[in-house]
Image: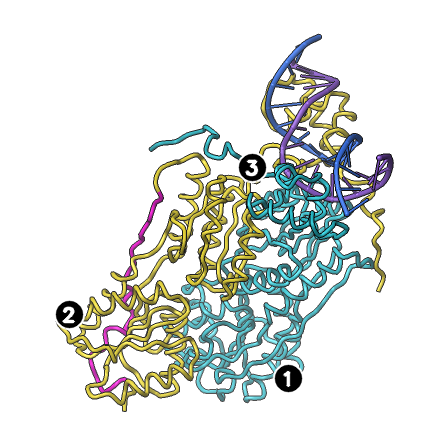
Chain colours: A yellow, B cyan, C blue, D purple
Amino acid sequence: MARSNDESVDAAGRPTMKDVAARAGVGLSTVSRVVAGKGGVSRTRTRAVERAIAELEYSRNDFAHTLRTGSARTIGVVVTRISDPFYAEVVFAIEQRAQERDLLVLVASTGDDPAEGERVLRRMLSRRLDGLIVVAHEEADVSFLAAEKAAGTRIVFIDRPPHGLSADLVIVDNERGAADAVAHLARAGHRSIACLAHTAGRFTSERRQAGFRQGVRDAGLPTRPELIVAVDDDVDVCVEALRELASLDDPPTALVTTNSRTTKAVLKALRLLDAHPAMVGFDDFDLAELMTPPVTSIAQDPWAIGEAAADLLLDRIAGLVGPDRRIVLGTRLVERGSGEQAPAGGVTGL
Amino acid sequence: MARSNDESVDAAGRPTMKDVAARAGVGLSTVSRVVAGKGGVSRTRTRAVERAIAELEYSRNDFAHTLRTGSARTIGVVVTRISDPFYAEVVFAIEQRAQERDLLVLVASTGDDPAEGERVLRRMLSRRLDGLIVVAHEEADVSFLAAEKAAGTRIVFIDRPPHGLSADLVIVDNERGAADAVAHLARAGHRSIACLAHTAGRFTSERRQAGFRQGVRDAGLPTRPELIVAVDDDVDVCVEALRELASLDDPPTALVTTNSRTTKAVLKALRLLDAHPAMVGFDDFDLAELMTPPVTSIAQDPWAIGEAAADLLLDRIAGLVGPDRRIVLGTRLVERGSGEQAPAGGVTGL
DNA sequence: TTGTAAGCGTTATCAT
DNA sequence: ATGATAACGCTTACAA
């Protein structure tokens, strides 16, 4: 396998402003002015420079530009997993917004390890980005970002508030959404409703559980702690949890799940158990309408979240000052069938 | 809304190596050596520098570093839509691979407009990235990248070959995959099989159609052009197409779809028509197993694609020379039920 | 082992 | 309107 360390392949190197200046027979600063489009250059010379640029296929070296101006024209986005459809959509929204302003987006996934998260964040920071949009691990203390914030890096958090730092934040109304789910099921006649809560993100999970409890109270139903159970997105775990729920006195006839990964796992578990309780899932997902029955859900709008975060960040970059902001977006109940089923047997259908 | 252009907020500025050197009472290059971890610095001074770095919360300015060394330690990824689950997974794989080598990833979506695609690409190029992984529009002529390639930017294309440029490429065996789908349905007894082909990506669509035709021949079935119909991911269009297929003499009893977006649209259309033909979809998707019946598919592995592209790019960056490579990944038949149904009525079930 | 100084390609400040 | 020239923060000979 032929390898080479010799630079000859790009020995010619890319043309610089100096090359363009030489070719156009003008001074360096004239080229700079033309490239920056700042005007103040005669038509003749402008044309000469433009020709030289075209002939040499010159394009500005952004690093030198950034080093000089201090603005990287880049924002960073840190999420747990870019392949999660929810975050993929958030990133897409951010990226589109950024491109409108001629900014580029650096993305990084941290996985579930807070330590790795900090490493990723630091790596981004040394890039001197104009701003950062971050989904922080809740176990992670991000107080080390305070210095960066003070030094001028604008940071917006999404999905959950950071620990050890006060900053701009965009989240959804988790309590309200979960309470809506319960209310909806109660309206369909359910009196015994269980909550299957995810474990991956503590903040959202707890808020949604709180909303669930509030919803139960609002519906005038008894508070029954045994009806709230933590599951992760493992199908077997869900099967087990469902079995236990079914074995209760007055077993639930309806379920609320707290995020789409959990919803999907529960759906698979229900199929295994051949059970068909009513259910409402927090966080909508692709193909929910093709489930049997179609899944009713509390939709968050990832695009709107990304957009709000990007707008806030862009405003900050543009110079908006003022206290930290907390933007809370609403959720929307999408009725499709699974939440409108009347109470039947128990949760396992047995 | 208070805005300010005054720089005082970050007037203090970030500490530079000079600041660290001053604080540690050493020379500039000593700091540089410590930061680079190159050794050749006495333990005492190393410690002094490290202390100063900690106290000042210094972090290296990557732009200056890049300007000097020429390596951005960044690769760019250009896809049509980062929110497409397939590309999101590809990007995730690339990003993970990159992070292992301490590289960061710049992503950009081009949307469906080739002109925008070129603008995005140029924006990336001026960043002097170490390399680029690109899903190019097929309508787009990317010959302008040739100069960049010559200048040293390594470029790997994925999913489809570029027009107007020869370069490294990672694709899947589209023909074989589609042929496998047909073979599988033929084994289940189907003699009349239709192909619903996507229109969004010409290359993949045509290759998969070719594979479909080959599969039909291999199965000893008659070639019937009317059984191949182009649809996009609009449900109404799919409904119409299915109706037409149903009205044929000897209507199809099984379907092959050429990508997951089409598969999903067809699934929705079939639900509307209450039809249940056998089907195999090219490109697996989340929740395929929860469809009714579970959808059999020809799985491509987006992670493997991203990994292969990243590895190839990284090898090139590391100095691998040699002719352009074309990596063709296999596909895998995932049997779930929809492809194993025996022939029943026509495609609409009527 | 350590420091000095010369650039990397740009932009900005000055004279001209 | 134009062109020298000095930074920007870093790496890397080259000296010491």
* Image position, residue A349 (x, y; %): 28, 88
Mark 3 vs mark 1: in front: 3
Q: Is residue B143 visible?
A: no
Which chain hosts label 2?
A: A
Q: Nearer the viewer, residue A328 or B303?
A: A328
Q: CA distance from mark 3 to mark 1?
A: 61 Å
Q: Are callouts 2 and 1 both on one chain? A: no
Q: Main secondary structure of the magenta part?
A: loop
Say what secondary structure mark 3 lies in.
loop
**Residue corresponding to mark 3:** A71
Q: Is residue A63 above or below residue A186?
A: above
Q: From the image, tell me which residue sits under label 1.
A: B219
Measured as percent of width and height from the top left, residue B155 is found at 70, 54
Left or right, residue B16 beside residue A19: left
Q: Is residue B328 above or below residue B338?
A: above
Tag 2 and tag 1, C-beta contact below 8 Å = no
Question: Is residue A332 highlighted in magenta?
Answer: yes
Task: Please tell me whether mark 2 sits on a helix, a strand or a loop.
Answer: loop
Give the labeled residue for mark 2.
A219
